[in-house]
Image: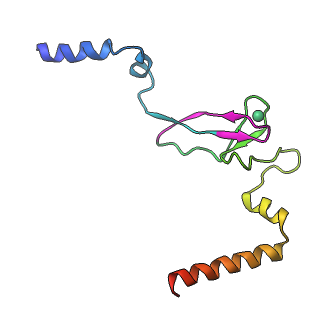
Amino acid sequence: MAGGNAIRGTRVGAGPMGESERGESAPRRRVSYFCSNGHEVKPSFALEAEEPETWDCPRCGLPAGRDSQEPPAPPRNEPYKTHLAYVKERRSDTDGEAILEEALAKLRQQRGE
Ligand SMILES: [Zn+2]
């Protein structure tokens, strides 16, 4: 059939993005990671894949995180620091609990409980 041949012809000569026709058929997305040296890494992942929490910076080898404001600490001190760990460093535990209580109370008020 002439119609089938026409469609095939268009696909083969589809232009400069020919790579996507050949190997990678799965759509990919880029995710930005930031290391504590200020480098930005943009590895790409398959759409259905879940991106990891951290990514090793190819330039300096430090772990890079999703948050540009709070990149992961260098592994020399501690292998992994959560956001909560940062918060706890800045405030005493008691302060943190008080703030949490306050936030919860506000939330309850907003919900009218
Ligand atoms: Zn880096």
Dividing the image into 4 quarters, which one contains the N terminus? top left
Q: Position of residue 50 (x, y in %)?
A: 54, 46
Ligand 1 is located in which of the four quadrants? Answer: top right
- Relative to residue 69, is residue 18 drawn left or right? left
Does residue 42 show up magenta in the picture? yes
Residue closer to the observer: 94 or 110? 110
Q: Position of residue 110 (x, y in %)?
A: 54, 80
* 31 over 59 or under it: above or below: below
Residue at the image point whose x is 62% and y is 33% from the top: 42
Q: Magenta span covers which residues? A: 33-47
- Relative to residue 67, is residue 72 drawn left or right? right
Residue at the image point whose x is 74% and y is 62% from the top: 84
Can you name the residue that lies furthest to the right here? Answer: 77
Q: Position of residue 87 (x, y in %)?
A: 78, 63
Residue at the image point whose x is 26% and y is 15% from the top: 10
* 73 over 5 or under it: above or below: below
Tell me which corner region of the image, top left, top right, bottom left or bottom right, holds residue 22: top left
- Relative to residue 20, is residue 9 drawn left or right? left
Can you name the residue that lies furthest to the bottom here? Answer: 113
Can you name the residue that lies furthest to the left here? Answer: 1
* 58 over 66 or under it: above or below: above
Residue closer to the observer: 81 or 1? 81
- Relative to residue 91, is residue 110 drawn left or right? left
| Picture mark count | 0
Colour setup of the view: rainbow
* 76 over 57 or under it: above or below: below
Q: Position of residue 7 (x, y in %)?
A: 21, 18
Does residue 59 show up magenta in the picture? no
